[in-house]
Amino acid sequence: MYYGIQLAASGALTALYRTDVLSNNLANLNTTGFKPDFAYTRQRDTARVEDGLDFMPSNDLLEKLGAGAHMAPNAVDFAQGPLTQTGNPFDLAIEGQGFFVLRTLDDGGTSELRLTRDGRLTLDASGRLVNATSGLPVMSVSNSPIILDRSLSASIDADGTIRQGGEKVDRIGVRDVKDRDLLTRVGDGMFTLSSGALGQSIPASGEIRQGMLEGSAVNAINAMMGVQAAAKSVGVNFGIIAYQNRMMERAINTFARIG
């Protein structure tokens, strides 16, 4: 492939990737507890360097230019979102570090833990405390479902202790992980724990605020400016591809006349 077209194409692809990531952030501007993604890119080395082909002859000029841009794995921005008062006793927000712990259960009986900052909770028909978005049960500090009396009101302390009728009933588990790069986004505001992260699960330092919800951590202005910049970069790179194509066509026509 003509080298100039290759470089411009890599720039266009990475700009499209950034547009997708930032557009998804904007789409979740009003999603409770949403944490936006960072769209990372990096320089791509030439094939000789990238593939370790040291035996191939070196082209110093091309290796100084590199091979364009390359998409890098996303990273999540776990910054605190704004807290909003709702007055609903089962709306909970975490102020500080940590996640609510949910548990899935498939038809085969296999269960997995999920972490979320979405504190929209409710009671199901059996009195289990569940996440209102996913319907998954909320885990206690002992990793068991929390069962409450539907006929009684509930007060929830900053440490997650639940009281009904003046008596302590259970305590909501709020956990964190040492290395958040081991968390994988799985949709509905949830993250899954890899095998490496399971061993790193630790008690969280954040405190629960009853009757409040954490809003999206997306900065609307920054995200919009990022989308516009990425879209502009796409247009510029496609323009360069068109220019390189015209130059190639002119060169071919010129050499054809000489022949």
Image (tube, rainbow, N blue to C red):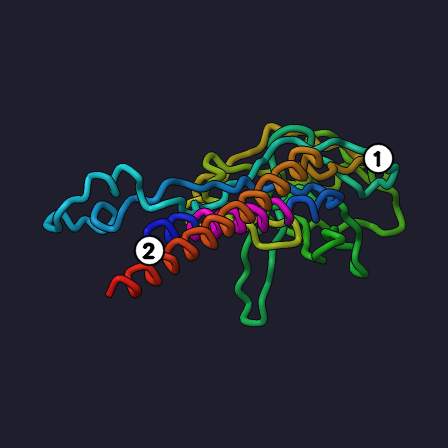
Measured from the top left, where is residue 91 in percent x and y?
Answer: 80, 41
Between 48 and 191, the one lying in front of the other is 48
Q: For the image shown, how many numbered marks are present on the structure?
A: 2
Q: Residues within 10 Å of mark 1 (few under 14, many from 20)?
A: few
Circle 1 SS class: loop
Q: Which mark is residue 149?
A: none
Between 2 and 128, the one lying in front of the other is 2
Which residue is at a point 27% across and 47% down the rendered structure image?
46
Q: Kindly report which numbered mark, 1 or 2, lies closer to the viewer in this rendering.
A: 2
Name the N-terminal-most of marks 1 and 2. Answer: 2
The image quarter containing residue 76 is top right
Give the Cα distance between marks 1 and 2.
Answer: 75 Å
Measured from the top left, where is residue 145 in percent x and y?
Answer: 66, 52
Q: Which mark is residue 166?
A: 1
Q: Which quadrant holds the C terminus?
A: bottom left
Magenta residue span = 9-23
33 relative to 144, above or below = above
Task: Identify the residue under disc 2.
Answer: 2
Which residue is at a point 30% across and 64% down the rendered structure image?
257
Between 190 and 229, the one lying in front of the other is 229
Q: Are marks 1 and 2 in contact (CB under 8 Å)?
A: no
